[in-house]
Image: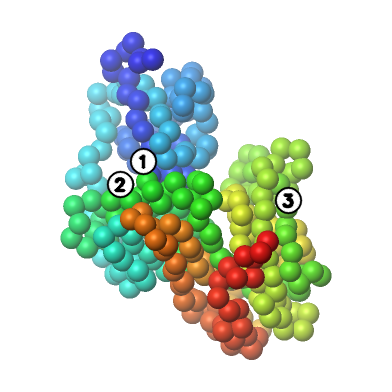
Amino acid sequence: MSDPNPAVQTLTVAADEAELRLDRWFKRRFPAIGHGLLEKWLRTGQVRVEGKRAKSGQRLEAGQQVRVPPLPQEAPPRPDSALPPPDPKLVRLLLDAVIYKDDDVLVLNKPPGLAVQGGTGMEDRHIDALLDGLRFGAAERPRLVHRLDKDTSGVLLLGRTAQAAAKLAAAFKSRAARKCYWALVVGVPKLRQGRIDAPLAKLPGKMGDKVAVDEDEGKRAVTWYRVVEHAAKRTAWLEMEPRTGRTHQLRAHCVVIGTPILGDGKYGGKAAFIEGQGVSRKLHLHARAIRLPHPRGGTLDIQAPLPEHIRASFAFFGFEEASAGAPFTAFDEE
């Protein structure tokens, strides 16, 4: 049923806007709308997602309908032409990170430390703000179809057209996409291969960007893992395949089995660090490979090389990349 007020807009969340917080979606679509006005709209129920009351921090999904109340005259939506030009140095960084490109799909080996989407104080230092620099002559800017944490490196998929992005996003939503991660963890799991099935929920208040196991309120989260190699009892190299896509799932699940990811002070505290000249304090989590249906048919199967700091740690502990074998094979029968 349409809204009786003609000034009300109902906008559809685009594929490249999936997983954006609602407040950041508004900031992107309507930069002149202040946070105070948005919160007032939310309190009074004037902003709705899929017809329901919404909160500023909720994550949006591609295809959802967002009700936008009448805008103040001084706050028109920002056209694409008004977007600031992307930082050329960061664009060069991403151009160098391209590991696959065809007419429909663009794949980056995301550098660690670069956020996928914006947040408070980040301005344009994130991939979403740089996508115009990755057009390669196409009429459309590429669209993000999934996310990685800021400090996680590895395979990041983009659709080069709206149609391709929608098909890729559908593969993620239907779990037709398989993702393989490599991590170095502190300690060695008691079971060298197994399944972690521990529901996760976001912590309240200012800790909302962190998750914890919650048997009552948490959403089911499942991860398959195996130990590829280990260096005594000091550290282990894990191969992991998440079967669900919860926020910080792998980071929280590694803590569940008593082996925090190396460099993950957020979840592992001091126990997540190993002193040693050659062991970086950066997060040692890498999206190694992805396999999913290609928008035009067939299968897209991509692997991303390790970033420099993880390669250095592999050398320090004596791990050989070839020891892992082909991605996904360890879990094909699970």
Q: Quadrant of the N terminus?
A: top left
Determine whether, in the image, residue 155 is placed left or right of residue 87. Answer: right
Task: Identify the disc placed on residue 14.
Answer: 1
Q: In this image, 11 relative to 56: left or right?
A: left
Which residue is denoted by mark 2 in the rendering? 162
Residue 109 visible to the viewer: yes
Where residue 246 appears, as percent x and y from the top left, is: 60, 49
Q: Quadrant of the C terminus?
A: bottom right
Contact between marks 1 and 2 (CB within 8 A): the answer is yes
- SS at badge 2: helix
Q: Residue at x 66, y 58 (%)?
A: 223
Q: Position of residue 332 (x, y in %)?
A: 62, 65
Amino acid under disc 3: Ala
- Amino acid at dot 1: Ala
**Residue at which label 3 appears:** 198
Q: Quadrant of residue 35?
A: top left
What's the amino acid at mark 2?
Answer: Ala
Image: 99 above or below 80: below
Secondary element at image label 3: loop
State which quadrant residue 67 falls in.
Answer: top left
The one nearer the camera, 118 or 221, is: 221
Q: Residue 70, image x and y in percent?
A: 32, 20
Question: Outermost residue toward the right?
Answer: 190
**Around disc 2, counting alpha carbons within 10 Å, would you say few (fewer than 14), some (14 to 19), or many (20 or more)?**
some
| Camera-side mark, 1 or 2 | 2
Where is residue 92 shown, x and y percent of the image?
A: 29, 69
User: Which one is earlier in the sequence, the residue at label 1 or at label 2?
Assistant: 1
Q: Nearer the viewer, residue 225 or 60?
A: 225
Which of pointers 1 and 3 lies earlier in the amino acid sequence?
1
Residue 264 or 244: which is nearer the viewer? 244
Residue depicted at 61% across the width and 58% down the height: 242
Front disc: 3 or 2: 2
